[in-house]
């Protein structure tokens, strides 16, 4: 892209007038675009006595062209160049360019550091703090070194998961530009093989449904949250026929979720991915435990938040929440007067319900307390068959664990579960509480770097997509 533009002597006056208006709380538009960096931009220019930053001897500097190039490649991170004044920069008057370029840098750097969308606007339970960034310092560094691209790359998340998503985004964009992967009709083995080949699941040339094709289909199913049975049934066909452009958008949305996170989740922590129905315990970067989980129903969603497991309760009682008691248990008792007795449920003096400890208890043998305002905890369950389902939205919001005994060992090393076979309820404090991050990713990498795409069970991708399509007006 060629710019034959010169920044005239009036640039400093334009800059001073704009920054003074921003400081007075007056909205400023340049070449039809709103200036968004209402705090860092005035501070940056005041420090340089309102001198232009991107022009020397009346010409745009190489670093200015480098910034324009970085804006044009914002899509590499799932962001839109239009959000960073690219069209306005192309049509701006000479004296307007410096303001647009500075605001574009601050916008792009801010979005790479902490996200394009405020997570609280979509996830009211959000409580993690994004990575702090000195925007003015970052811009000064870019101008001093002349390497805008390097500065922006270092501002973006460094987590390996983020980098793997970037690589997959580039790969799928290349597939989309080559025409995508087409549709697969039921019974069309040729279309199935072509689809799996284009997406990289199947290697080599195949003319029949051989073992390699079946293995590739099982791999596809495993990486898309399906039962890996090697049969192209209705759900598998539906996932195969999701267009490449939709997968690209899915990656872009999950890149945004990574930008909301702090630089590190800790040295030792548990990570719950709600739509993947999966819990992982990480210790010093190494996976020490993983298991399937059951999460909340669509109408009783497990919230997104961070906390820590502070206590393990053996042989827990289940004190039934009032909503469950009134909506489900009391009606069941009305239909069958023996229901409470059969389920070992007693009515307490205040009218609330308690299910006694035992193999019948909804919480199983172990409960994991983790302080939060949503009354959500993790627990064992007698309903073990549910872990065999590919979609596991069955709870009232709490998290049911496939391997509660193994998590207990992580929290209470050396504890013998058999010691609690007497059925007596006991609470044991955890000496080193385990941080827990309950998050929502519909695309994620596993321990060996393979990308998984899972259904958006709570419809959160659609809400994030809508929010990311709105033009920024401030930050």
Image (cartoon, rainbow, N blue to C red):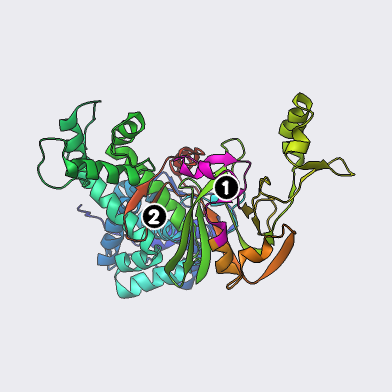
Asked if residue 283 lies left or right of residue 26, the reply is: left
| Vertical placement of residue 320 versus 265, above or below | above
Magenta stretch?
380-405
Name the residue that disc number 2 marks: 100
Within 10 Å of disc 1 (Cα), the crowding (few <14, some 14-19, many 20+) is some
Cβ atoms at labels 1 and 2 below 8 Å apart: no
Instruction: Residue at 48%, 72% (x, y): give it.
Output: 47
* SS at badge 1: loop
The circle drawn on residue 234 is none
- Residue placed most toward the observer, 94 or 286: 286
Instruction: Residue at 63%, 64% (x, y): give it.
Output: 418
- Residue placed most toward the observer, 44 or 72: 72
- Residue placed most toward the observer, 155 or 359: 359
- Residue placed most toward the observer, 409 or 201: 409
| Vertical placement of residue 313 versus 451, above or below | below
Q: Do we see residue 278 in this rendering?
A: yes
Instruction: Point out the residue furthest to the right here.
Output: 349
Residue 248: image location, x then y, percent: 32, 44
Q: Earlier in the sequence, mark 1 or mark 2?
A: 2
The answer to if 131 sits in the magenta stretch is no
Within 10 Å of disc 2 (Cα), the crowding (few <14, some 14-19, many 20+) is many
Residue 462: image location, x then y, percent: 46, 37
* SS at badge 2: helix
Name the residue that disc number 1 marks: 123
Residue 1: image location, x then y, percent: 20, 52
Instruction: Residue at 77%, 36% (x, y): give it.
Output: 340
State which mark lies toward you, 1 or 2.
1
């Amino acid at each position: 892209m060629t710019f034959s533009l010169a920044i005239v002597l009036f640039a400093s006056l334009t800059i001073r007038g704009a920054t003074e208006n921003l400081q007075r709380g007056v909205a400023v538009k340049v070449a039809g675009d709103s200036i968004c960096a209402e705090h860092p931009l005035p501070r940056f220019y005041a420090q340089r006595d309102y001198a232009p930053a991107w022009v020397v001897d009346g010409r745009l500097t190489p670093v200015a062209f480098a910034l324009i190039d970085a804006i044009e490649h914002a899509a590499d991170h799932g962001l839109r160049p239009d959000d960073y004044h690219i069209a306005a920069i192309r049509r701006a008057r000479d004296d307007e360019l410096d303001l647009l370029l500075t605001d574009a840098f601050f916008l792009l750097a801010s979005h790479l550091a902490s996200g394009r969308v405020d997570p609280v606007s979509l996830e009211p339970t959000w409580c993690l703090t994004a990575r702090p960034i000195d925007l003015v310092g970052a811009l000064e560094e870019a101008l001093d070194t002349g390497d805008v691209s390097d500065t922006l790359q270092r501002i973006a998340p460094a987590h390996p998961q983020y980098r793997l998503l970037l690589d997959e985004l580039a790969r799928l964009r290349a597939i989309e530009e080559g025409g995508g992967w087409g549709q697969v009709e039921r019974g069309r083995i040729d279309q199935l093989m072509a689809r799996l080949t284009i997406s990289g699941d199947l290697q080599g040339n195949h003319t029949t449904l051989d073992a390699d094709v079946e293995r590739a289909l099982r791999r596809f199913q495993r990486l898309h949250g399906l039962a890996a049975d090697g049969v192209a049934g209705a759900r598998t066909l539906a996932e195969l026929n999701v267009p490449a452009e939709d997968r690209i958008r899915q990656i872009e949305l999950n890149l945004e979720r990574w930008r909301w996170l702090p630089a590190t989740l800790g040295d030792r922590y548990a990570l719950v991915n709600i739509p993947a129905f999966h819990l992982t315990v990480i210790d010093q970067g190494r996976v020490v435990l993983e298991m399937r989980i059951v999460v909340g129903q669509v109408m009783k969603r497990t919230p997104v938040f961070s906390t820590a497991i502070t206590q393990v309760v053996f042989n827990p009682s289940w004190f039934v929440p009032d909503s469950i008691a009134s909506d489900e248990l009391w009606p069941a008792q009305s239909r069958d007067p023996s229901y409470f007795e059969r389920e070992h449920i007693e009515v307490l003096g205040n009218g609330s319900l308690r299910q006694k400890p035992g193999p019948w208890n909804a919480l199983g043998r172990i409960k994991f307390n983790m302080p939060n305002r949503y009354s959500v905890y993790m627990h064992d369950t007698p309903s073990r068959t549910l872990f065999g389902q590919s979609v596991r939205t069955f709870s009232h919001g709490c998290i049911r664990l496939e391997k509660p005994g193994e998590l207990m060992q992580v929290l209470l090393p050396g504890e013998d579960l058999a010691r609690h076979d007497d059925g007596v309820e006991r609470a044991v404090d955890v000496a080193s509480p385990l941080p827990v991050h309950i998050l929502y990713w519909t695309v994620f990498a596993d321990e060996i770097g393979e990308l998984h795409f899972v259904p958006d069970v709570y419809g959160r991708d659609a809400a994030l997509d809508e929010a990311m399509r709105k033009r920024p007006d401030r930050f």
